[in-house]
Amino acid sequence: MTKFYLQVKYIADFIVALIGIIVVSPLMAAIALAIKIEDGGNVLIRQSRTGKYGKKFICYKFRSMKSGNVPFNIHKPVIKDSNENLTKVGKFIRKFKFDELPQIVNVLKGDMCFIGPRPLLPVYDCEYEEWELIKFEMRPGLTGLAQVRGNGHLSIKARKYYDAYYTLHASPILDTKIILKTMAVLVLGERRFLTHVSPEEYASLQSEVKKHKISRQTYINFGLTPPDEVKKEND
């Protein structure tokens, strides 16, 4: 990961988002109308997510469920297509990831970028090992490495590995591969690209993370004391 590339990436994302929201606005309007016609409920849902440096932000999505009162299991978070709580419109927009389109607004606001670690619900904040916090050194993305390596078919641990790996290795080449694979996933499905992570890969990445500094702000936002301050207290 280079700070220069990320700065260029964020600027490019803003420009693309500005053009993109104009281009897809007719599609977004049609989806909003379809959701409203089906059951008269809210078009959008607003969820708190954990973003850069562990700060919370409001993430926008098109509503795809009949009710928000669905039991949530952090170890099995993916809603299956057969879930009876999904609306008819919801099944369609989730299949093609159209429910994520409102997050273009998040990109414009600077909360997110197009490619990066996916932002998770705050309920996952206590699940991170210290080295995995490296993912919060950049803005979260609409799609990312985990999303093209199996996404919902991966364990949470594997998804966090891919998030951390991407944060350290973000590059134009990797981003191009993710864009192409994201399009393939939309056509062929996530399971087709399922790639598990070996214990050796975990160990290697963990060692690599140790060479990089996690921001003080990230530690504080996760309720942790930065290592440098712990060292001073012990001296």
Image (cartoon, rainbow, N blue to C red):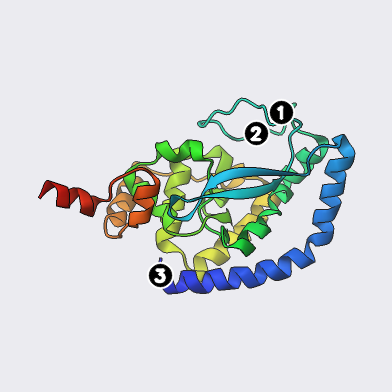
x then y, percent, for residue 160: 44, 45
Q: Earlier in the sequence, mark 1 or mark 3?
A: 3
- Residue type beneath disc 3: Thr
Which quadrant of the figure contains the N terminus? Answer: bottom left
- What residue does disc 1 label? 83
- Marks 2,1: beta carbons within 8 A: yes
- Residue type beneath disc 1: Asn
- What residue does disc 3 label? 2
Distance from disc 1 to disc 3, alpha carbons, whole Å, reads 42 Å
- Marks 3,2: beta carbons within 8 A: no
x then y, percent, for residue 179: 61, 61
- Which image quadrant for residue 24? bottom right
Query: In the structure shown, which secondary structural element does the residue marked by tag 3 occupy?
Result: loop
The residue located at (34%, 52%) in the rendering is: 205
- Marks 1,3: beta carbons within 8 A: no
Q: Residue most toward the right?
A: 37
- What residue does disc 2 label? 79
